[in-house]
Amino acid sequence: MSQVPESRGLHPELSTMTAVFSFGVSGLARYLSHAELMRVFQRAAVRAGWPLQFSEGFNPRPRLSLPFPKPVGVETEADLAQIRLYRRPDLADPGSLADSLQRQLPAGIVIEKAWIMPVKGCYQPVLAQYQLFLSDHRELERIRSRAHFILQQGCILLDRPMRPGQRRVDVRPFLDRIDLNECICVQYRIIDGATIRVSEVMQLLEVDLEDLARPIRRRAVQWVLSAGRKVDIAQ
């Protein structure tokens, strides 16, 4: 019979805290789905031996969230994981927490920094960037012209596959700007949890995966704490 970790019980007399980890995903780890990445962090937190707060019910799980689901195949920077813990003196140092979690994570997932959330709440993304690196830089001028045309539009309707069928969505409100230098940098908004998909970005720019020299990267995420304070993790 397996032993149930002490942290799975209810501890109403103990105070809790939320540890927040900024992390990046690269290499083969970029092929993990959101659900798989959640399980990776859950197992890493359990192996780290932390006093985790678990959900209630028949299938208790660590109270952990990744508030910005990552598209499969896309690398990320400044992503966030939030883990709910019971307070313990040896867990007060964010640097030690980051090192402890990093030791349990697979290759390709790197903890960038850690901190204890100062107030109750959760982080939500409001702005981010996709970077697309072209194999042939001669295509940049064509795409620059295409980007200029896109941003001049007041409405951009795309058919988005849904279950069942599909739905027509105006993606123009999500597009903030498109810059072209060494790569294509598309800055986009997240509005009430909705945003433009990376496949839709590529469709609009008329770029295929075969045109890219390296994996797509999501970076420069700007976060808002539920209390209303903006936090740029990349800085």
Image (cartoon, rainbow, N blue to C red):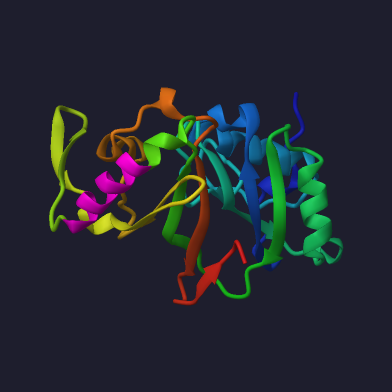
User: Compared with residue 197, is residue 152 higher up or lower down, i.e. above or below?
Assistant: below
Specify the quadrant of the image occupied by residue 161.
top left
Residue 52 relative to residue 103: left or right? left
**Image coords of residue 119 (percent x, y):** 58, 75
* Magenta residues (range): 141-152
Question: Residue at the spot x=28%, y=56% of the render?
Answer: 174
**Image coords of residue 180 (percent x, y):** 42, 50
Question: Residue at the spot x=30%, y=52% of the render?
Answer: 194
Q: Quadrant of the C terminus?
A: bottom right
Residue in front for this viewpoint, 142 or 28: 142
Residue in front for this viewpoint, 17 or 93: 93
Q: Can residue 18 be seen in this view?
A: yes
Specify the quadrant of the image occupied by residue 179.
bottom left
Residue 148: say if magenta.
yes
Question: Residue at the spot x=64%, y=49% of the render?
Answer: 23
Residue 60 relative to residue 97: left or right? left
**Image coords of residue 169 (percent x, y):** 16, 45
User: Compared with residue 104, is residue 154 higher up or lower down, i.e. above or below?
Assistant: below
Residue 98 relative to residue 21: left or right? right
User: Compared with residue 122, is residue 170 higher up or lower down, i.e. above or below?
Assistant: above
Residue 75: say if magenta.
no
Q: Is the magenta stretch mostly helix, strand or loop?
A: helix
Q: Can residue 10 be seen in this view?
A: no
Q: In which quarter of the image is the N terminus?
A: top right
**Image coords of residue 109 (percent x, y):** 68, 39
